[in-house]
Each structure stands twice: as C-alpha cells, then as structure tokens.
Image (tube, rainbow, N blue to C red):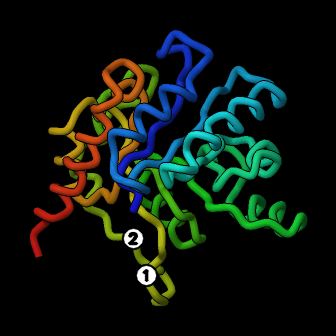
Amino acid sequence: MIRVVVVTDRRLFGSEEIAGRVAAILASAPHGSVAIQVREKDLDGGPLLRLVLEVIEVAKPAGARVFVNDRLDVALAAGADGVHLPEHGLSIADARAAMAAVGRTLAIGCSRHAPESVLDAASQGADLVQYGPIWATPGKGPAIGVEALALKLRDPKGGPPPRARLVAVGGIDGPARARHAALAGADAVAVVRAAWQSTPEVIGKLVEAVEAGVRARPG
C-alpha cells in the first residue's frame, strides 16, 4: 500500500543521475509502500523518457509504482504505472480517452487545491489525489492547514466509495508532520525536499510515521 510518494527534482539533488538515489530510497522502505512521481518539467520528451526508464528499472524490483508528471505520452511509451495530472493539465476524462485509444490503462494521480476539486477528482475515478499545500512550502500558495485533510471522499451520487487515496502534500519535512497528516485523514504523503535534501533512510521513517498516524485515527 502506497504511503509515501517521492516526487523527483534533480535540481535539488544536484545531479542528473537520480536512479541510484531512487534505489537507495526504496531500499529503506517496505516493499510497495513508496511510489515515485517523475516530475522534471524542463526535460524534453526524449531525455524525460530515458530518465523514466532508468527509474522504472530500479523501482520495479522494489514494488514501487512509477508515475510520470503531466506527460501521458511519455508514461505510455515508458511503460510506467501511471500518469500524474496537474490541476490545469489534461483532464481525467481526456486522459482515460487517450489511454483507451491505444488500448492501455494506467493509474491516474492528480493535484488539487480545494476540497470540492478533491471530491470531484475522486468521483471521476482518480487513484491518487494530492491535496495541499498543507504546510507552507517554497513556490506554492498559502498553506491550507492540516485540518483540510478531514474531508471524506465519497460518491456524490450515493454509489460505492471512490477508490482514490488522499495524499497530503506541501511542507512535509519529516516524520512528525507525516504522522500528523495521516492522523488528520491522509492515506499517504508526497514529498520533494525531504527526499532529496536528506538521507535516503528518511523515506522509510516517513512510511512508518504515516502508518502510525493511520492506526491512531479515532474510530
């Protein structure tokens, strides 16, 4: 079960060779508990494809699912597990139509910044919905606060609950905040700086913190 989404940023890492770091990160965490979102907005299609293939090569043995940010074409070409759709990018419906046109099905992650948008994405069948920024983080809007994670994902038409997992993002700089987010309602957390500006072992600690927060929820 995914508890931590590691979002890549080779500029923070200071190196173009991030696959080795991904391997070290995954070695610190239980099998299948971490997903990797490849988000390198400055890379053109060819270099991005090569990077995604490198990440998949080290992620697959660890049971880690690989999502490609924004570029559905690259996700399909690389054989990635999923695509992550920015809020103002390709719609969930259009992404599914494009997949159907080539006979493929990928998991869909997406970013949302308001409760009604989170619920809408969940009802449309997103697999992961990143919601934030929960705490202040460079380059993002104002923090919405951990209390925002208390929303309940539900089908507005009264059908079965959506399968979407709520992923807290923004300012999650260590296990304490990861646990707090999970206790408040998140199923997982997404991290950028914590993954690339600390030791790889921190990701395993974040997984443990999320698990502890989920177990400690009332009721």
Q: Is residue 138 above or below residue 203?
A: above
> Can you tell which mark lies on residue 161?
1
From the image, tell me which residue sits under label 2: 153
> Can you tell which mark lies on residue 184?
none
The spot of residue 172 in percent (x, y) is 29, 35
The spot of residue 73 in percent (x, y) is 82, 46
Classify mark 1: helix, strand or loop: loop
Classify mark 2: helix, strand or loop: loop
Residue under the point 51% across and 10% down: 14
Side of 88 relative to 190 (left or right)? right
Q: Earlier in the sequence, mark 2 or mark 1?
A: 2
Do tag 2 and tag 1 residues touch (Cβ < 8 Å)? Answer: yes
Side of 22 relative to 68 (left or right)? left
How many numbered badges does the structure rendering display? 2
Q: Is residue 79 above or below residue 160?
A: above
Residue type marked 2: Leu
In the image as oriented, which residue stretches furthest toward the right?
101
In the image as oriented, which residue stretches furthest toward the bottom?
159
Residue under the point 54% across and 50% down: 61
Side of 136 relative to 180 (left or right)? right
Side of 171 relative to 105 (left or right)? left
Q: Residues within 10 Å of mark 1 (few under 14, many from 20)?
A: few
Q: Residues within 10 Å of mark 2 (few under 14, many from 20)?
A: some
The spot of residue 60 in percent (x, y) is 58, 50
Quadrant of the image containing the C terminus: bottom left
The spot of residue 42 in percent (x, y) is 70, 20
Residue type marked 1: Pro
Q: Is residue 124 above or below residue 80?
A: below
